Amino acid sequence: MAEHERIGDAATADGLAVAPSMAPALASVRAPREHPRVDGRVVWLCGVSIAVAVGAGLIAELLTRLIGLITNLAFYGRLDTAFVSPAENRLGPWVVVVPVLGALVVGVMARYGSAAIRGHGIPEVMEKVLHGESRIAPRVMFLKPLSAAVAIGTGGPFGAEGPIIATGGALGSLVGQVLRITADERKTLLAAGAAAGMAATFGTPVSAVLLAVELLLFEYRARSIVPVALAAAAATSVRLALVGGGPVFSMPAVAQPGGTALVAYAVLGALVGLLAAQVTRVVYAVEDAFERVPLHWMWWPALGAVVVGVVGWAEPRTLGVGYSNIEQVLSGGIAGRALLLLVVLKFVSWAVYLGSGTSGGTLAPLFTIGGGAGALLGAAAASVPWLGVDPHVAALVGMAAIFAGASHALLASVVFAFETTRQPMGLLPLLAGCSAAYLVSLLVSRTSIMTEKLARRGTGAETEYVSDYLRQVRVGAVATRALVTLRAGDRLDAVRAWLASGAGGATHQGFPVVDEDGALVGVLTRRDLLDAAVPGTVVLRSLVRRPPVVVYEDSTLRAAADHMVHEGVGRLAVVSRARPTEARGILTRSDLLNAHVHRLDAAHGARRVLLRRRPRAAGAGDAA
């Protein structure tokens, strides 16, 4: 019998001999590492996250008081940290100067401090998570809240929540850079700080966690969601101690809506979703317009502030954060033409100033615009009694729907509106309206107000999450079972002759090597065997440079893929846990790719399952 035929006979699809002791067997192979869902490291990370949250909660209160101090100084000439609206100022035409002065300060801070303070903060934090290993420069933690306080305190039509979220994220990132942790753990601390910032601002811990999941974490794992949830709870506790536990936006109690009203709220949400997509386009169109201004970008906020001042002179309620405006919209305190004027002028002021590159948040202006639009549409629908639409609920749905449509954070939007108003009967209309807004905005635009900036920089973010398909498939289901093994004692020249013969199995790219007892020694590739620098007189055992790299039959394909990357190999010997030195198959990179065929077919292979017409048997009905 030819030597190459003898080698070919070593091919087997069945088990080989097992080592008598499991401990030596396990020590002789490199199997994938298995990590528990949570461990002591997660408990430690929870403690750090809570500490970050307490810091973020205190920063939120400090920023709120700083905004109040600057507002009181700029518009009323008094030393007071109370959070007040600039709307009651008596400056007359001189009110135009105040935002311009604030914008000049912000421009200087951005140019000579850090350009990262420009914008509303969340897209910049998202970019650091996606492409910067969650590393935010420490100076941003100081300059971002300070610049935002100056911009908002001098009349900027922004909310404080965006800068607070960015500052909380920067605090978490800073702690994560000081400690010796992984990039994933640093991302968790960043998200914990950001969620804590939002929870401390609005007293909305659940929606803060959801927002972190939908916009920052890009995952839903116990190792990350538990620290973030505890951080949001801790930050809310800080708010309760410093501010109290009442709803942020008070409104009249609402009744359970009927079926017809739910349909109307869904239609309203769809219209507001369309508005949200257009709002995003206008904001970035204004930003593009400023890019063409022949001045250094540090002067752009001053130009935008002129519009803020003029609009604020015409309608003082557009100045500043405007939380009181949101509450009045929800309670019906502003209606009709006054509400329409407020919505239009607030949008103009906010879009121009944000597009100029100053520092400020987007949520509060969006709530004013969306709540006002919802209230106006609700008032029109209320003139048709059989619809059963409540203008208060319509305003609530509009407020949340524009958040859902602009940010593409559906669940966070629904829960946020509930947590800020404490209106349980509003949950059903919120779910219907926000879902419709989310659907329409996705149909109209692939990006959100948060991700459009990233897309323009070529670093777009996918905000849809699905379970990793490779985690759902076991190695044993896709591994190649027609295994061809080589004996460790065979000479290389005999193996080369067998490869050249083209016999069955000789065309494979990798071969497990076994000893005389059938125990796995290692894996050799075709390149190893045909290396011209290696003489043919050597035996295969001498070519094996490392212990065999294996994967268990019941391991997931994700574990196998990660193991390939970690070990720097393109194929793994498949073994059982009971017999880790017994090669039962082989898994290659091609097997990993081919496993996706079923996933793609499930996603795109539309077919009828029930009521499918069966083919008629040959000759059936002929007798009739």
Image (cartoon, rainbow, N blue to C red):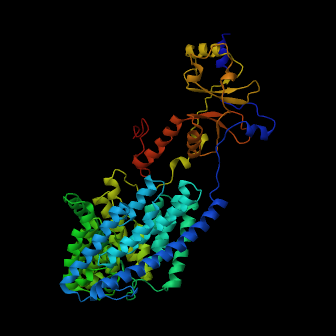
Residue drawn where x is 44% and y is 54% of the image: 130
- The answer to whether 439 is drawn above or below residue 260 in the figure is above
Horizontally, residue 326 falls left or right of residue 34, namely: left
Is 451 on the left or on the right of 196, as rendered? Answer: left
Q: Relative to 59, say whether 458 is above or below.
A: above
Numbered label tally:
0
Task: Please state, as top left, top right, bottom left or bottom right, where the N terminus lies in the image.
Answer: top right
Q: Residue furthest top?
A: 1
In the depicted view, which residue is nearer to us: 138 or 594? 138
Q: Could you tell me if residue 340 is visible in this image?
A: no
x and y percent of residue 397 in the render? 34, 76
At which x and y percent is residue 94?
20, 83
Q: Residue 410, can we see it?
A: yes
Residue 59 lies, in percent from the top left, at 47, 75
Q: Residue furthest toward the right?
A: 20
Residue sitting nearer the eye, 437 or 180: 180
Instruction: Say above or below: 598 vs 118.
Output: above
Which of the two residues, 287 or 558, is positioned nearer the viewer here? 287
| Residue drawn at 55 percent across, 49 percent down | 471
Which quarter of the image is occupied by the C terminus? top left
Residue 216, image quadrant: bottom left
**What is the x, y in percent for residue 602?**
45, 48
Q: Is residue 40 left or right of residue 64?
A: right
Q: Quadrant of residue 557?
A: top right
Q: Which quarter of the figure has residue 547?
A: top right
Between 90 and 349, the residue placed more toward the observer is 90
